Image (spheres, rainbow, N blue to C red):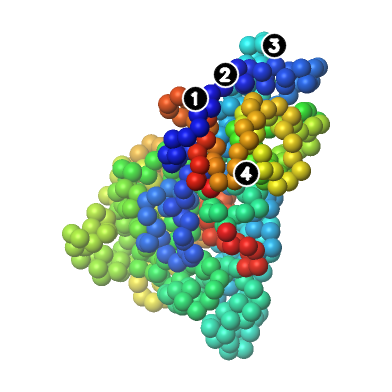
Amino acid sequence: MTTRGSGLAIPTGPIKSHLATRRHVLDIDDFSQEEINEVLQNTDVMKEVLSRDIRKVPTLRGKTIFTLFYETSTRTRASFEQAGKIMSADVINVSASGSSVQKGESLYDTALTLQAMNADMIVIRHAHSGAPYFLARHLDASIINAGDGAHAHPTQALLDLYTIKSHLGRINGLKVAIVGDILYSRVVRSDLWALTKMGAQVTVCAPPTLLPPDFLQGFPEEHPFAGVKVETKVDAAIEGADVIMALRLQLERQEAGHLPSLREYSRMYGINSKRMKLANPNALVMHPGPMNEGVEIDPDVAHGAASVIEEQVTNGVAVRMALLYSLVTPSHNGSKS
Amino acid sequence: MRRSLARIAHEIVEGNVGNSVVLVGIHSGGVHLANRIGDFIEEFVGTRPPVGQLDIGLYRDDLGRRGRPIMRPTSIPVPIEGVPVVLVDDVLYTGRTIRAAMDALNDFGRPSSVQLAVLIDRGHRELPIRPDYIGKNIPTSLDEAVRVRLHENGGDDEVILMWGQA
């Protein structure tokens, strides 16, 4: 049973990681299909950890993760914190309110402070698009974008992919309708990249005042979103859809004059049980949260049988664990072999 | 290989008289082997022991230093509290994988004992770890590599010793 020799390289060891060279998660647009699939596969493993009696693994022992939030958040920040803690990292939360940011400290100086405290990873949410890129250029730590302006929210896109795939078995070829405030939503931008890259047929739907001009004009043929359909009538968007994703109507937008009234928006664009009948019978209802129930989504749909909204939250923890795992680097004082 | 695994199965049965063991294969090499040993035990005593699988990616002490392998699913089908567990792997080398596997196992409960079955022991331990059941000892040098290929992954069962691969 033993042969000596051959000298051929035989690929029986661990499967090589496509994420091995990745240092940051700044956007989803630079993820390859292989990288996305690897994150989804690792997320599956993390879900198993979440189902254990003892939800603790030693993977990130001795690592320090700072969450630096310049905007409010419940689930994103809490899920990063939980993900880090389950993996034994030390997680320190810094939010703009209640920190020196209120005293006028710049983003750069705040970031240098965290670096001086040996941050291994920094999870940042900022109102300005590009803030995570700025940190990645100037710091040694791995940077994870937890939402920047109306630009990107890559971890949300990954958890959405995972949630869809775990229910429907695939993403390629699915019809996904995204309904709501497309103009200001960073979630939709990242979801569009992620879903189109994985082969879904995406329709975005909103009143014309909540659609960016380039969406209204239609994308040129060579544009990555060329296959994305743009609808202003919600029934047409939902018809035959496998996934319906409602987006939060940012209530402050009404004051900006985008909408005549919330009630009208709800009547014309709200996801309700009557509209759900137009969708595929097994369709999933998703929402990145926080919801305005009764505005963009009716309570009976949000908490109904088709809803996977709470599961999105659980999956968010698992996805973030998978990303933390993929970004972990050897200790600075460890031997580098 | 078949004879070695059959002998290991016999020894596991003999070594655990009156106890029902749980076999746990370590990804990636140990999972198929654990299943095969489970088949042999079923053949010998009539009942198949529970067979689980374990990925140790989250417990490695060299994470990031040697890359971050894609993880495979862990599933331990029955509670392991108070029962003997036999870890199964293909090649025993430094012992670091087994150390990580023991840590991982502990998170699922406290087995009455943890035993170790390996197809190949190639020496060069870096930790005080010793196998209870060995298919074959193959003395190697550090610049050699041992690969176990199994028909479950396509091809034949074979153990290949390669040099200049370390």
Q: Judge depth for marks 3 and 2 and give the one in front.
A: 2
Q: Judge depth for marks 1 and 3 and give the one in front.
A: 1
Between the C-alphas of marks 3 and 2, the distance is 18 Å
Between the C-alphas of marks 4 and 2, the distance is 26 Å
Between the C-alphas of marks 4 and 3, the distance is 31 Å
Amino acid bearing label 3: Val
Amino acid bearing label 4: Ile
Between the C-alphas of marks 1 and 4, the distance is 24 Å
Label annotation for residue B157: 1
* Callout 4 secondary element: loop
* Callout 2 secondary element: helix
- Residue A313's place in the image compared with A30, above or below, is above
Q: Nearer the viewer, residue A266 or B53?
A: B53
Mark 3, Cα crowd under 10 Å, few <14 / some 14-19 / many 20+, is few
User: Is residue A18 something one can see in this rendering?
Assistant: yes
Chain for disc number 2: B
Amino acid bearing label 2: Arg
Q: Earlier in the sequence, mark 1 or mark 3?
A: 3
Between the C-alphas of marks 1 and 3, the distance is 25 Å
Q: Are marks 1 and 2 in contact (CB under 8 Å)?
A: yes
Circles 1 and 4 on the same chain: yes
- Which residue position holds label 4? B56
Please tell me which residue is depicted at 66% across the width and 18% down the height of the picture: B7
- Residue A125 image position (x, y, % from top left): 52, 71
Please tell me which residue is depicted at 37% across the width and 55% down the height of the picture: A32
Mark 2, Cα crowd under 10 Å, few <14 / some 14-19 / many 20+, is few
Please tell me which residue is depicted at 44% across the width and 52% down the height of the picture: A18
The quadrant holding residue A183 is bottom left
User: Is residue A297 something one can see in this rendering?
Assistant: no
Q: Earlier in the sequence, mark 1 or mark 4?
A: 4
- Which residue position holds label 2? B2
* Callout 1 secondary element: loop
